[in-house]
């Protein structure tokens, strides 16, 4: 987790690396696990959260993972799949929140009053800010106000941004007395990141080789002392 946070602090250029760490954190990726990275902007922030490191100019990047074989309910217009989310991390300026075990779901609305919506929501954990607030909930919704973004309410991948009329992400914070504040904005990029098992094994092999190389270098230096 700490490695993932350091990667995300370097910006969206290496978001794919964050996705790789996300998959490793939550187990070797299998066919049912789907990984996405995203970047975005901040449009609104509660006054209690404003700081030099989290404000309207802050960059936003992150990743999420879900299991597309999760059982749920799928009706004519609404599909709900509790427990589908298996990983998430979001970096807003200098603050990082990540997935924690708890309530989560992916919900699809197909051709209802506000059109189509693909929504992910999950409990989160994060550091405590000076005013006593910490992140407790993250949600992401992708909308098309006239429908047509997807067909059916079965658990499926999020629609492409090009097919949407609106996006929103939100990170909810709570203090010890139950007061809530939030920061939210829009998604500017959403990218599927395939992670075959072979890639993960290759990554694990690289880590092992780096470790062996570092150990050899230390031994070489010691022999010269």
Image: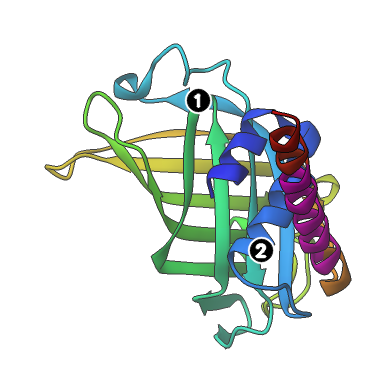
Q: Nearer the viewer, residue 25 or 183?
A: 25
Residue 157, given in percent of the width and then of the height, sits at 75, 67
For residue 22, say whether it is visible: yes
Q: Please tell me whether residue 33 belongs to the stretch shown in magenta.
A: no
Q: Nearer the viewer, mark 1 or mark 2?
A: 2
Image quarter for residue 62?
Answer: top right
Image quarter for residue 33?
Answer: bottom right
Residue 53, given in percent of the width and then of the height, sits at 47, 17
Q: Residue furthest top?
A: 52
What mark, if any, has residue 24 been given in the picture?
2
For label 2, the SS is: helix
Between discs 1 and 2, the one toward the N terminus:
2
Q: Which residues are magenta?
A: 200-216
Residue 52, given in percent of the width and then of the height, sits at 45, 11
C-alpha distance separating marks 1 and 2: 24 Å
Q: What count of labels does the image hold?
A: 2
Disc 2 residue crowd, few under 14, some 14–19, many 20+, Cα 10 Å: some
Q: Which residue is mark 1?
A: 94
Residue 94 position (above or below residue 2) = above
What residue do we see at 82% from left, 62% from top?
A: 205
For residue 117, say whether it is visible: no
Residue 207, given in percent of the width and then of the height, sits at 76, 54
Q: Please tell me whether residue 215 belongs to the stretch shown in magenta.
A: yes
**In the rendered image, which quarter contains the C terminus?**
top right
What residue do we see at 71% from left, 53% from top?
A: 19
- Tell me the colour scheme of the image: rainbow
Is most of the magenta stretch helix, strand or loop?
A: helix
For label 1, the SS is: loop
């Amino acid at each position: 987790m700490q490695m993932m946070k350091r990667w995300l602090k370097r910006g969206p250029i290496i978001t794919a690396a964050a996705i790789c760490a996300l998959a490793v954190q939550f187990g070797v990726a299998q066919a049912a696990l789907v990984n996405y990275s995203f970047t975005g902007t901040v449009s609104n922030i509660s006054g209690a959260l404003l700081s030099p490191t989290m404000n309207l100019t802050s960059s936003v990047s992150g990743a999420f993972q879900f299991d597309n074989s999760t059982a749920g309910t799928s009706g004519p217009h609404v599909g709900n799949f509790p427990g589908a989310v298996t990983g998430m991390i979001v970096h807003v300026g200098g603050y990082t929140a990540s997935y924690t075990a708890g309530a989560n779901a992916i919900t699809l609305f197909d051709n209802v009053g506000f059109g189509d919506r693909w929504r992910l929501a999950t409990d989160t954990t994060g550091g405590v800010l000076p005013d006593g607030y910490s992140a407790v909930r993250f949600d992401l919704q992708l909308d098309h106000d006239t429908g047509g973004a997807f067909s059916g309410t079965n658990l499926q991948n999020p629609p492409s941004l090009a097919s949407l009329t609106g996006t929103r992400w939100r990170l909810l914070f709570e203090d010890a007395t139950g007061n809530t504040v939030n920061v939210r904005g829009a998604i500017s990029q959403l990218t599927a990141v395939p992670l075959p098992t072979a890639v993960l094994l290759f990554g694990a092999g690289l880590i092992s080789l780096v470790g062996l190389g570092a150990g050899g270098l230390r031994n070489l230096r010691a022999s010269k002392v």
